[in-house]
Image (tube, helix red, strand yellow):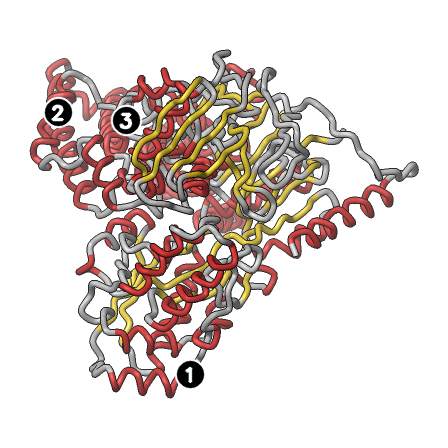
Amino acid sequence: MQTYLLHRVLAVLPVMLVVATVTFVLIHLAPGDPASIIAGPDATPENVARLRHQLGLDEPLPAQLFRWYGRLLRGDLGDSIFLRRPVTEAIVERLEPTLLLTSWATLIAVLIGVPAGIVSARYHNTAVDQSFMGLALIGLSIPNFLLGLLMILVFGVWLRWLPVAGYVSLDGGLWPNARSLLMPSVSLGLVQSALIARITRSSMLDVLREQYILASRAKGLAERAVVYKHALKNAIIPTLTVIGITFAILVGGAVVIETVFNIPGLGRLIISAVLRRDYPVIQGVVLIIAVTYTLINLAVDLVYLTLDPRIRYR
Amino acid sequence: MKRMFRRVCLGMVVLAVVAGSAAGSFAQETPRMGGVLKVASIGEPPTLDIAMSTATLVYEIMWHVNESLFTYDKAFNPVPLLAESWTLTDKGLRYTINLRKGVKFHNGKEMTSADVVPSLKRWGRVASVGRVLWKYVESVDAKDPYTVIISMKQPSSSLIYGLSEPHASIYPRESIEAAGEGQLKEFIGTGPFRFVEHRPDRHIKLARFKEYSARSEPANGFGGKRTAYFDEILFLTVPETAVRLAGVETGEYHHAMFIKQDSYERIKSVPTLESRIVKPRGWAVAVMNHKSPLMSQTKLRQAFQAALDMEPILVAGFGSRDFYRLDPGVFFPEQPWHSTASAKLYNQHDKDKARRLLKEGGYAGQTIRWVTTREYEFMYKNALVAKQQLEEVGMTIDMQVVDWATLNNRTEKPDLWEVFSTGFVFSADPANHVAFRCTFNGWWCNPEKERLLAELQGENDLKKRKAIIDRIQTVFYEDVGSVKLGDYFTLDVARRDLRGDFRTAPRLYFWNSWLAK
């Protein structure tokens, strides 16, 4: 068990090195640079060149890359060009809204998706199943930003129940914070719940056709016990993978929803960094997202261990 | 026109209030102190150091904090702001600028020439316009604590315009020393609001500066008396345009910048909202690359200019006629420098002439690379329609759609493009318009134009200046410096309870505005 863990954690390091290098090279290959963005559209070329020199962007690329490696080894992600502060600080500041949003959205997705999947599987090919799966299809097909904008129109502008956009941090109180995150997490969660429902349903269906289910029914177990105790535990593994991936995607990928609802999270940070070519921020955030992905994958694998003894003994 | 628009707006406000209340009296409203103004802005400014950037958003936020020696009145003529008065002697070679006494910085220190001299020197060193103008400046010295002398190498009528721009703001000497060659580290000024905090992607917070020393003359354009009625101003970053509008509608923001022009009708139908058309904002342009082998041929540029039919191009870009205007002027009709010289060369849509010019120029279907962007949707749409029109006369256009950062970078390199899309925003100084600048990407360095520009720099008589500008515009059209597509206006939205003269187009400011209760 411990060697397994150690092995998995150590495997993260080469992944990080590759991610770091590829990100660095890719964004420096993209045309455009922060100096001309800061200087503005009508700036004179000399002015842009002067700024470029000040920011150290006129050094050869390999020199910049190795300087960055050196910093990374010391745990320093560098300073943002636009935000005038260390990248680590900027990321930490954005973590709260992103993690809260992601957790709420995942919770909503699981609370809706898993039961819907189970019920659909249990009442396979009935009207219940078909209407759930129809809804799921609609859910999968609606882009989350559209759902978000529609909700803003209905609950923000027409009914005035919720603020149209903006984020209230936890310091501002639990309820205002939850209120500001309600619409964005629902619009993210609903779409993900459709995916989770479909996966849960299909793996439940597979399991329900297994012979041990037939056997447990034959020995007279109540249907509830068959479904929830025997079938679900085995069927949940693929769902768990999807939930894990969903969470990871949302941490770095709620870009559109964060923009629509004006939430100052990691997604907003990276998108504005890309548009402004804020190299240190892009590199930092991509690295952090890569670490998150790897860690969540690791966590999911560890949950497998507890759920499925076969993996444990291998 | 602007005044008429304001009257119409005021009229609508009056109507709404009369209709809405039994008392219905609104003739003389006294401004109210207090409240927090919330402004939804389009994004994060690239910097808060005004001198560093020509981006509009930077000074539209920060000129509440930092002030310059001069500013513009309603007619866009320079008038003193931190300066008390000025004289020009020695045949235009010596500016004597007297400073106002008792003007305090936000740190409590009084502003004197010891702050003004390093501020101006920094402007000449780092700001784009400052650097252009500094080549005319011999020296800048403090004669006494309240007098600054600028000695010129040669006369420049642009200098006073440059000093009226927010980029030439005055900072405490200590702030400038702390910044060194880089960006400012602290934001201290003399403005009616002081800088409180910047939380990226959330807000920039300003608060009323209680010891602000306002001018005594009545407000006139950006000049005259400035009063901070709000306790605080929050510039909130709201990148999504639909959300900016929805937020003003529900009252979460009082004002939102850059609303999509197609929301105009909807805004008119909501009684609590007021649309504000920013007129003039700028003109849409196809910039020609005078260093490329193709576009350096005059006939080809003339063919490009002759082929275009501007109306459909502008309709595609801006939708309704409320938001564009067909006008040949390099300067807007709202400015004293507006000219109709060579108007017949604007919006010709003469396909035969274009084909003839192409033939005379020996054009054989070589690809013309037109770089444009969707980040400013109008640029892409303008280019799309223009491309079709140009192809009808036989030109081959390769439209390259890239993001704004890439466009700026690519157009710095003359061998990568023939034409690019951009917008030239309002410029008060006729001698320093981007369209005429030889160093601007496009590199239009026509000797006749350069000679006329130099003449304009040395001329202070208004009538003679206007005559020179007419001639420059003629050269602009005959030699096709770049191709003007048309004037455009943008749409902002405000709640009706935001009162006062809070906008003199084309620049946004919130002193002398207040929130009615």
Amino acid type at mark 2? Leu
Residue most extreme to the right: B22
Q: Which residue, given by chain and number where applicable, does mark 3 sit on?
A: B182
Q: Say which element carries label 1.
A: loop
Can you say whether A47 is above or below B360 in the image? above
Tag of residue B350: 1
| Residue B489 appears in the figure | yes
Give the residue drawn at x 68%, y 46%: B274
- The image position of residue B335, as x and y in percent, is 55, 55
Residue at 30 percent of width and 83 percent of height: B357
* Local SS, label 2: helix
Query: Image point 45% across, 49% down: which residue?
Result: B429
Give the number of the disc on residue A13.
2
Report the mark closest to the observer, 2 or 3. Answer: 3
Callout 1 and callout 2 share a chain: no
Judged from this view, the residue extending furthest toward the top is B108
Distance Cα–Cα, label 3 vs label 1 = 51 Å
**Left/right of residue B278 with respect to residue B371 in the rendered view:** right
Where, by quadrant of the figure, is residue B263 drawn?
A: bottom right
Q: Amino acid at mark 3?
A: Gly
Nearest the eye: B483 or B141: B141
Alpha carbons under labels 1 and 2: distance apart: 65 Å
Viewer-side residue, B37 vs A160: B37
Q: Nearer the viewer, residue A186 or B408?
A: B408
